[in-house]
Image (spheres, helix red, strand yellow):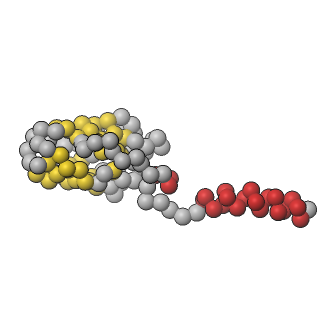
Amino acid sequence: MRRFALVLSLFAMPILASCGGSSSNDYGTNPPPPPQAGIVQVWTNYYAPVADTITAGQTVTWTWATAYGVDHDVVFDDGSVNSGVKTSGTFAHTFSTAGTYAYHCTRHPMTGTVVVR
């Protein structure tokens, strides 16, 4: 019986260790860095990168990177752009004028900024 308890504890320890705590990103996984300026990944509870600097005339594409089916949107703080709510896919916007554009998710406390030079 003691041997059974020892074997059980060896299997249960890693499982219990993985259950606790919280993470600042998706279930403890880190997204790969965006491949280039103009790509923003939409994860379960944040945008990556949070700030992106591009050149006027360039397009930024938001890609829903999470496979967990969580609804998000991209809404500019001034109300000029709204991606609509999505659980997957992409949304693109071309920035023709220099400036700083703040955006957020209306469903979760996620924010981001695009700086156009």
Q: Is residue 96 visible from the viewing direction of this image? A: yes
**Image location (x, y in percent) of residue 22:** 50, 62
Above or below: residue 9 compared with residue 55? below
Q: How many marks?
A: 0
- Give coordinates of residue 61: x percent, y percent: 26, 39
Residue 116 falls left or right of residue 37: left
Q: Residue 78: x, y in percent?
A: 15, 51
Taking the spot 33% from the left edge, 45% from the top edge, the residue there is: 34
The part of the image, by quadrant, that contains residue 85 is: top left
Residue at horizontal 25 percent and vertical 54 percent from the top: 51
- Residue drawn at (27%, 45%) of the image: 74
Q: Is residue 83 visible?
A: no
Q: Position of residue 5 (x, y in %)?
A: 84, 62
**Hey, which residue is sitting farthest left in the picture?**
97
Spot the residue most to the top: 89
| The N terminus lies in quadrant | bottom right
**In this picture, residue 46 sits left or right of residue 52:** right
Residue lying furthest right: 1
